Amino acid sequence: MENLTIIQHALIQRNLTLLRDRRTPHGEFRRLLHQTASLLAYEVLRDLPVRAVEIETPLEPTVGYVLDTEVVVVPILRAGLGMVDGFVQYLPEARIGHLGIYRDEATHRPVDYYAKLPPGLERAWVIVIDPMLATGGSADDALSSLKARGARQLRFVCLVAAPEGVRRLADRHPDVRLYAAALDRELNRHAFILPGLGDAGDRVFGT
Ligand code: PRP
């Protein structure tokens, strides 16, 4: 699991517990997902490249820093939408791409149904977000289509990851760093993450 960074933070652990709890209603789930994505973003964006610039404070000249890369945030629909604001609140200039992928209930294989991506993928930091990494099929599919469109510098961020999905991405995309709030135990025979948090898309949108 060398490709995976688990982000340790007391507030993330507390929020994830509430997100896992079946009693948490959808409005609260949505709020907690947004807040947790914000905490994850703070860590994932820690090493964004910066460039020194000269500025003047009210008292004297000094050296400051500006971000030295473009950032593209790509939620995997639907559930990834619930994490977008947590990232772009720090990056008002970021572009947002959308990839619509759902998992076929019988085969568990990803099905693409939508793609709208901004220009400049080849020179941007591209951050793919989705609360769940289960079999890894959806993430694998998303990362492959972003690479086919020129993306070079990719990260994948989720809340809960299953070992099966982490292994799949290590095998298929060894260049992509993964971030999660937790590494869960396993998948059940329906390819749901255990203990997991249920169907994130249904819980965030109340469907
Ligand atoms: C869920 C989840 C991921 C995917 C993970 O989406 O949000 O996108 O499944 O599973 P995988 O790693 O095995 O591919 P779902 O298919 O339920 O679509 P939805 O977000 O539209 O509900």
Image (cartoon, rainbow, N blue to C red):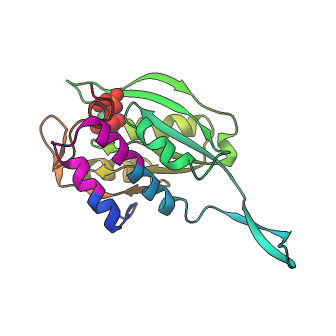
Q: Is residue 103 left or right of residue 69?
A: left
Q: Is residue 44 left or right of residue 96?
A: left
Magenta segment includes 31: yes
Q: Position of residue 40 (x, y in %)?
A: 43, 57
Magenta range is 15-34
Residue 110 seen from this side: no
Magenta segment includes 124: no
Between 112 and 179, the one lying in front of the other is 179
Dominant SS in magenta: helix
Q: Position of residue 46 (x, y in %)?
A: 55, 65
Residue 145 seen from this side: yes
Q: Is residue 103 left or right of residue 42?
A: left
Between 188 and 168, the one lying in front of the other is 188
> Measuring 27% from the left and 54% from the top, which residue is drawn there?
16
Compared to residue 65, the image places residue 121 above or below, namely above
Q: Position of residue 60 (x, y in %)?
A: 87, 79
Q: Is residue 195 left or right of residue 160?
A: left
Q: Classify the position of ligand 1 by quadrant: top left, top right, bottom left or bottom right.
A: top left
Compared to residue 106, the image places residue 38 above or below, namely below
> Measuring 70% from the left and 64% from the top, which residue is drawn there?
50
Q: Quadrant of residue 150?
A: top right
Q: How many numbered callouts? A: 0
Residue extending furthest front? 58
Query: Which quadrant is the N terminus positioned in?
Result: bottom left
Compared to residue 172, the image places residue 190 above or below, namely above
Query: Which quadrant is the C terminus positioned in?
Result: top left
> Measuring 57% from the left and 35% from the top, which residue is drawn there?
148
Q: Quadrant of residue 109?
A: top left
Q: Position of residue 122 (x, y in %)?
A: 67, 43
Between 199 and 36, the one lying in front of the other is 36
Residue extending furthest left? 189
